[in-house]
Amino acid sequence: MVNSVEITGITLDKAYYHPGETVQVQASLSSKVDAPSQVKIRFSVTHLADEISHQEQAVTLNGGDQSLQFSYTPPQTIPAGYGIDLQVSTSGGTRLASASAAFDVLNNWTQNPRYGFMTDFQPGRTDLAETMQLLTRYHINGLQFYDWMYRHEQFLTDIDPYTDLWSKVPHSIKTVDAMIQAAHDHSIAAMPYTAVYGASMDFYKQHPDWVLYDLGGKPTFFGGDMMAIMDPRPSSPWTNYLLDQFDQVLQKTAFDGIHLDQYGDPKVGYDANHKPYDLAPVLADFINQTKVHVDKYRSDGAVVFNCVTNWPVEAVAPANEDFVYIEVWSPYNWFSDLHQLVVNAQKLSGGKPVVLAAYIDATFENNARLMDAAIFASGGGRIELGENDGMLAEAYFPRYKVMSPTLAAAMQRYYDFMVRYENVIGPSTQDATRDLQENISVENVSTSPSMMSDKVWSIVRQSDGMTAINLINLLGVSKPEWASQVANPPTPLANFKVTLTGASGKAAHIWVASPDQTDLALQPLAFTQSGGTITMQVPELAYWDMILIEWSK
């Protein structure tokens, strides 16, 4: 007799899969039995609401921990997200346990970037395989190697171990190389942090005429007397020098491109003759030059640039970067600002993926869920997860904080959900929030776009024949600022009506799913339609529900 059985984990071998690759899945079970007992394991793969494959195994539970292996080769359609559902039943069909997961098929990680971070490059590190396997739980498919280099102006050195400019913690290029390989073993790209104009003071003293000047004709410094800001204009000595440094990195390491940082200021530079120049087009040109150099060495290499406080997104979003990366600071304080930053960057870039860097303490667990709900439902991504189940707490990445087991489990569900439903909420879909938001109402609560707090907020994405209405719960959240701790969970709703007016077509099917549930599969939703008005009965809302409407053809 089986006293209890639990699916303790579903592990995939890669962060994403290329067309034609086989997905290898390991399921971990834990059981308590009076005697060896046979159960049935059902492994199914879904695309949205359609089951496209399933396998069944008869397994004898002996008590304790057991592992099961499954494999599946998905269709070569890209980009495509899939769900995995695992069910343990008795031979008579009584369900004993279930669990959900996801995977996706992409040509390149930048089609749907789930960006993470690495900060520990100490000599002799031995946990790299385990670290990358942990990150595949969240489908992290690209990693920023933060301050991995010897100096901002000299990335590589013959000294080993060496220390970087800021931390003074020993690094080893052997660890860096081994970490890149471990990432590649799990289909995770490795991106080296660089800064477009940062140089050590020692380097500046050797090249004082390469510096960027301020209005008063004085050199521009950063971090007190730690760094000088150099002149990044096209064909400047500094630019030519740094591009050569990029070449050396791409020749001598297996990094997958270049991550470019900047500091947000200054926005105007001056030459030695006090002549001003706008840095926005300069930085766009720097991105384009960097991409040329990356393409020389990597056929699928990536270039990413940091828009600090969303500057200068108008200039750089259309440039030759692979996705738009925005570091969020005031005045973008509200949860709603995260949505606007994503959709604005999507528009400016012609539909490129968007990743936000918005830092919070890992103890702000309600914030983390609401932030990811807002960003993921908007078709964006967020750089937040990396080393040791860590979550970025500030702009200096080594000061990350470790998530609680509760938050780590929630984040795994949220990333599974984002991947599973990327074809209806991901980067390849289109925003329809402005067009439809005022047409969506929830009984007895506010959904007004003009209100910031104490409401149910809707974010809408359109795809081929589908409309995804995402309900973000801000009920009881009196101060909906993402960086200010939301002390209590939103006030939950149960068994409530949602109405959509002005529908131009007939709904064929409507489902609901939520990353706040352990079962991530779409569930049929009861609805009625009268003309252009659709009324749906939703069972519950904690943080984030997705209502998916398939329109009749």
Image (cartoon, helix red, strand yellow):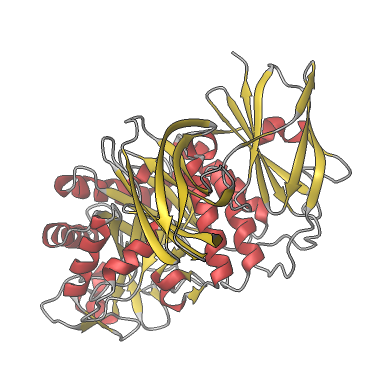
Relative to 370, residue 203 above or below: below
Judge from the rendering whether residue 334 lies leftward or rightward of residue 25; answer left or right. Answer: right
Q: Quadrant of residue 547?
A: top right
Locate residue 391 relative to residue 488 in the image: left or right: left
Q: Quadrant of the C terminus?
A: top right
Classify the position of the N terminus by image quarter: bottom right
Expressed as whole percent of the image width and height from the top left, the position of residue 486 reads 71, 67
Expressed as whole percent of the image width and height from the top left, the position of residue 326 reads 48, 55
Q: Is residue 416 left or right of residue 523?
A: left
The residue located at (54%, 60%) in the rendering is 2
Give the vertical position of 373 relative to 21 (above or below): below
Number of numbered markers: 0
Nearest the viewer among 238 and 358 is 358
Q: Is residue 98 left or right of residue 432?
A: left
Residue at 51 percent across and 43 percent down: it is 345
Q: Residue 372 location, x and y as percent?
A: 57, 55
Determine the residue positioned at 15% across, 62% down: 253
Res. 275 visible in picture: no
Seen as rendered, the residue at the extreme right is: 444
- Judging depth in this view, the residue of 487 and 164 nearest the camera is 487
Name the image quarter holding residue 468. top right
- Give the residue at x 69% y 62%: 481
Q: Is residue 334 visible in this depiction of the protein? A: yes
Looking at this view, name the residue that lies furthest to the top.
553
The x and y percentages for residue 470 are 66, 41
